Structures are given as C-alpha cells and as structure tokens.
Amino acid sequence: MKTLYNNIIAKLMSNEAKTAYAQSSVAACKFVDLYRGQYLNWEAFDTFPLPAVLFEFGVNYDSKGEGTATITLHLCYEQLQDTSSITRTRDNALKFFDFVTVTNTLLSELESQHTGKLQLVSEETIKDDAIVNVYLLTFSSRYNGRNTEKYKYVNGEELKVNGKIRYDLDF
C-alpha cells in the first residue's frame, strides 16, 4: 500500500493535476494524508489545508490467497457558500463536485507494483457531522503485496516426488 499511496501523492501533486484542476476552475489538491478521522475533530480543523484527500484501505484474501484491496479516498473541500435552490451563487458553491470529478479522472486506472488498476466501485457523501464537505470515492483492485503462497494447499496429484525412499533419516 505504501507504493500506491506514494503514487497517489505524486499524481495529485503533479503539474498535470494542477493544470486539470485549473481548467475546471477549482482549487488543486493541497494535502494528502492517511485517514485518521481528521475532519471529525473540531479542535484540529486548522491542521490540514484544503482541498485534501485522505487515504484509507483494507485488503481481503480469498481461499486461494489472492488479495482484493478496497481503497477509500475521503475528498475534503471547504464549503463556505450556500448550496440551496434559492441562492444566486449555487454554481460557485457546487465547485466541490468539480473537484471530485477531476480527482476521480486523475486517479482512475492508477496502479502500483502491488495493486492492479483502481476501479471505482462506489461514491457517496458522508452524513457525519464533519467540519468540511466530504465525498468518498471507493476503489477496488487486485492486491499482491503479501506472499500468501505458504497458505496454499495441494492435492496428492499435484505433489511431485522423486520415487526414492530414504532410510538414513533420524526422527
């Protein structure tokens, strides 16, 4: 996950990303970190610049030892304007969704040495009492960062033997 995390940082902080955000007239991502509930802590509100992307992951292994990673990105964007149906500044207030679109485009199909291409599986806004607007993008990919060969079992037909009996073994 370390490699994927570093790839995400490199992609979101690249000149390509800055250009993509500028073309959509939204602020570029300023901060990437591991998710630790930062936006739920009112006392720590000023500790990270916005917009920000927070990285969270989990890995599940099947019976064959093959891993599937679930990567959730918490996209944080400060919302100071009214988004209601009666406001005249609604388009500007909804720039948050443009930030989400650009970020998703930049990261779609990103991969690392231990993960396959990221595939978007879900997206949603959080319903918690957060300090900022938070949009969750959840991706899935194959994961081969751990050697699970030792957990694989073989049938007798798959076992290779040389056909010789050794009598010199002490037990």
Image (tube, rainbow, N blue to C red):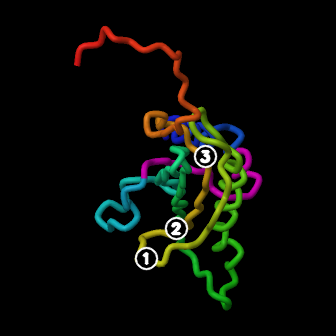
Lateral position of residue 157 relative to residue 97, left or right = left
* Quarter location, residue 40: bottom left
Q: Secondary structure at mark 2?
A: strand
- Mark 2 or mark 3, which is nearer to you? 3
Q: Is residue 3 above or below residue 130?
A: above
Q: At 40% across and 64% down in the image, what residue appears?
A: 39
Q: CA distance from mark 1 to mark 3?
A: 30 Å
Asked whether the beta carbons under mark 1 and mark 3 sit within 8 Å of each other, the answer is: no
Tell me the residue that label 1 is attached to. Answer: 128
What numbered label is drawn on residue 142? 3
Residue 112 vertical placement versus 43 (above, below): above
On whether residue 20 falls in the magenta region, the answer is yes
**Mark toward the start of the polypeptide (2 vs 3):** 2
- Picture disc at residue 134: 2
- What is the C-alpha distance between the residues marked 2 and 3? 26 Å
Residue 146 lies left or right of residue 110; in this view the side is left
For the record, the magenta segment spans: 18-34
Contact between marks 1 and 2 (CB within 8 A): the answer is: yes
Measured as percent of width and height from the top left, residue 24 is found at 74, 57
Q: Which mark is residue 52?
A: none
Q: Residue at x 53, y 16 (%)?
A: 162
Instruction: Name the kind of residue labelled 3 in the image.
Output: Arg
| Residue in front for this viewpoint, 81 or 119 | 119
The image quadrant that residue 151 belongs to is top left
The residue closer to the viewer here, 125 or 171, is 171
